[in-house]
Amino acid sequence: MSRDGNTKTKKFCVSISDRQLSKWVVSLILPLFSFTGLEGSRVKGLARVVILACAGKCTINQAAKKVKRCLTAGALRHHLRKEQDIEKIERRTNIILQQIAKKILSGKWLEFAVDIVYLPYHGQHMKDKNEVVRSKAKHGTTHFHAYATLYVIVLGKRFTLAVRYVKKNTSKVEILEFFRKTIQDLDIHIKTLYIDRGFCSVEVLASPKSQFHEVGLLADKSEKFAVNGAVPDVGSPIKLATGASPPVILNVPVFMATGADLPLAAQRS
């Protein structure tokens, strides 16, 4: 307390080194690689290579050259191929992503975003013909591997809460329902929901199963208006069911753009 009676607030700054962050992430994802049969420094080295390949958007070969005392790239790929059940990997990944989030975010009203990522693929399917999906041409192909992600937006940053493997026969309704249930199970409430414009379809807006129901006309906005960040106060009311509790009414301004994908913005009224 100062002499004039005002309370002084101390500010604390916590810094985390790259090494500390790397060790924490490695320890967090080690359970994902239990199928390899590797132990100790070998499995930690594999985890570091995978993290580096993902963060640096490079190949296993390139990442392995930068990690000291790890197996060769060929040996790493051999062990990674031992597990080909993508659904099992998805379940394990989501458990890891959510175990910390539930403790911190439970009970809060937060913003969320849903995206679908298409990875261009030139080749034939490995096991299941449905593992390769078709979409708008990109990088010389209409064939892709795809996955959907659910993000929670905290302090202006996106944090992944769940991933969903998308097959040829996976409907957008199924994806949204999976993520809706994920949010519900974590006991988090939707303040705002941003949905990739790829979900703006009759399948999603008109299907009772999706629990998204159109009750008004969609508002078309120009690309210029959408890109500059303005969110219009005009939209289509959408109902998002939240289980046993009464449905939340969401106002959904729809951005129709010819360039990069822009989201649907669903704001709780």
Image (cartoon, grey):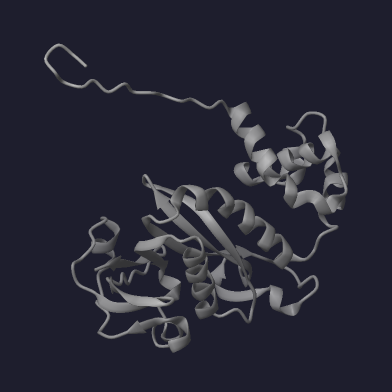
Query: Is residue 139 visible from the viewing direction of this image?
Result: no
User: Is 7 situated above or below 179?
Assistant: above
**Number of labelled discs?**
0
User: Is 206 situated above or below 1?
Assistant: below
* Quadrant of the rendered image containing residue 17: top right
**Residue furthest to the top:** 3
Nearer-the-camera pick, 143 or 204: 204
Residue 267 placed where, x, y %? 29, 66
Q: Along the horizontal axis of the image, is 153 left or right of 255?
A: right
State which quarter of the image contains the C terminus: bottom left
Residue 177 placed where, x, y %? 50, 75
Q: Residue at x 83, y 57 (%)?
A: 81
* Quadrant of the rendered image containing residue 199: bottom left
Query: Is residue 108 visible from the viewing direction of this image?
Result: yes
Q: Along the horizontal axis of the image, is 15 left or right of 264?
A: right
Q: Residue at x 13, y 18 (%)?
A: 5
**Residue furthest to the left:** 4
Nearer-the-camera pick, 78 or 161: 161
Q: Along the horizontal axis of the image, is 170 left or right of 123?
A: left
Q: Residue at x 36, y 69 (%)?
A: 258
